[in-house]
Image (cartoon, rainbow, N blue to C red):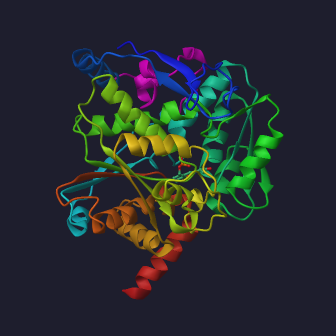
Amino acid sequence: MIARYELRCSECGALAQRHDLPCAICGELLEFALQNDARDPALARAYIAMVSQRRASNDPLDRSGIWRWRELLPSIPVDAVVTLAEGNLPLYDVSAIAKREGIAALAFLHLGMNPTGSFKDLGMTVAISAAHAAGARRAICASTGNTASSMAAYAARAGMEAYAMVPRGKISGAKLAQMRDYGVRVVEVEGSFDDALAALTARADGEAAVVNSINPYRLEGQKCTAFALLEARSWRVPDWVVVPGGNLGNSSAIGKGFREALALGMIERLPRIAVVQAEGAAPFVRLYTSHTDLIPIVPHTVASAIAVGAPKSWRKARAEIDASHGAVVAVSDDEIDAAKARIGAAGIGCEPASAATLAGITRLRAAGSIATSDDVVAVLTGHVLKDSDASLRVADHRDAGA
Ligand code: F0G
């Protein structure tokens, strides 16, 4: 398959240089925009068959669920690629939960089953590989814990130094321990994730690669979530794909993946994308439902991973919800905890931010947005071991009520 991409501004459309971060003209986020204009389903079928054969190969690029799709990624010299065999993603059918929710089918695509335990690895392999190819010696990010853990691992593999700006006291102990295990230098910032990102922007000196999801290479890796999901379902498109939203890079990336799959002839229609936020960190739900621009807030939620008050990718995410006729919804911390208990009791487990998806499904079903006949996939973004305090709190509560 021949796919051609141009790095452009996602807002003004200006062409960008490979290592620009915001658009030099208008300051908005960049994207790798697909240039193919003709759908070719026969070519797409042949390509899918070739990618599927790569699963049996022992080439490290083929063992990665991201680099298997390399024709659809920015081109990076093979010897600069840093991979940890990410992207081999289980899809768990949960028919008992589907029945209780009153929907036809439900499955969890578990992105927590990645090398560092979160979906960040899917994008980090591309962002760090691109930085490595460009000769960067340092990587830096702001993080609620998962981005930093992932960056730390991939940077270490590439022989790069890594610096993480994190909100003091607002990230789980397990994540802090994990990122330090990989040797990252941690800079604690007072306030929230948004303050850490602002501190990073003020500090970034052009020498270090910024690997937050404002980096368009990250989203190219994460868009492969859509391909992996479709592949695991033998290319049957679900009715809904439900994703938790924080900085909104992941929902933007997954939406882009489905749109490209449609544009290239791999599928015949788009699934609807639903973004779920925690009530205390729901600036996107507010802007989407009130048709305004972003109004930043100070975030508060038990789902520390998605405690983001000024999401950078809100314009991109809004475009994906519009393109897919999707939905946005906010859920309370109690609903997140209850959903986490149910996902744990199904033998799957996840961190609180991921459990927001199931809480969101319950809400969207009650509102009639999700219909009884719908086939739904919820994207679990982080592993259960990422936040053991949350697991203890939820289990204590469940056992006390039993
Ligand atoms: N789920 C988990 C487990 C996360 O760690 C994050 C984001 C999200 C969902 C939301 O994804 O930001 O692309 O909308 N974590 C970031 C971090 C903020 O620093 O690890 P998003």
**Is residue 112 at all visible to an observer of this figure?**
yes
**Of residues 13 and 313, which is closer to you in this image?**
13
Q: In this view, does 270 lie above or below 181?
A: above
Residue drawn at the location 67% of the way across and 25% of the way down: 131
**Is residue 384 at all visible to an observer of this figure?**
no
The magenta stretch spans residue 308? no
Magenta part of the chain: 55-84
Percent across and percent down for residue 347 are: 34, 62
Q: In this view, does 26 lie to the left or right of 257?
A: right
Percent across and percent down for residue 158 are: 66, 28
Quadrant where the image shows the C terminus: bottom left
Q: In this view, does 13 lie to the left or right of 165?
A: left
Percent across and percent down for residue 261 are: 33, 29
Q: Is residue 257 left or right of residue 5?
A: left
Q: Is residue 120 above or below residue 302?
A: above
Q: In this view, does 99 lie above or below 321?
A: below
Percent across and percent down for residue 69 are: 41, 24
Residue drawn at the location 33% of the way across and 67% of the way down: 362
Residue 371 sits in which quadrant?
A: bottom left
Residue sitting at the far front: 291
Q: Is residue 251 left or right of residue 200?
A: left
**Of residues 336 and 59, which is closer to you in this image?**
336
Quadrant where the image shows the N terminus: top left
Q: How many marks?
A: 0
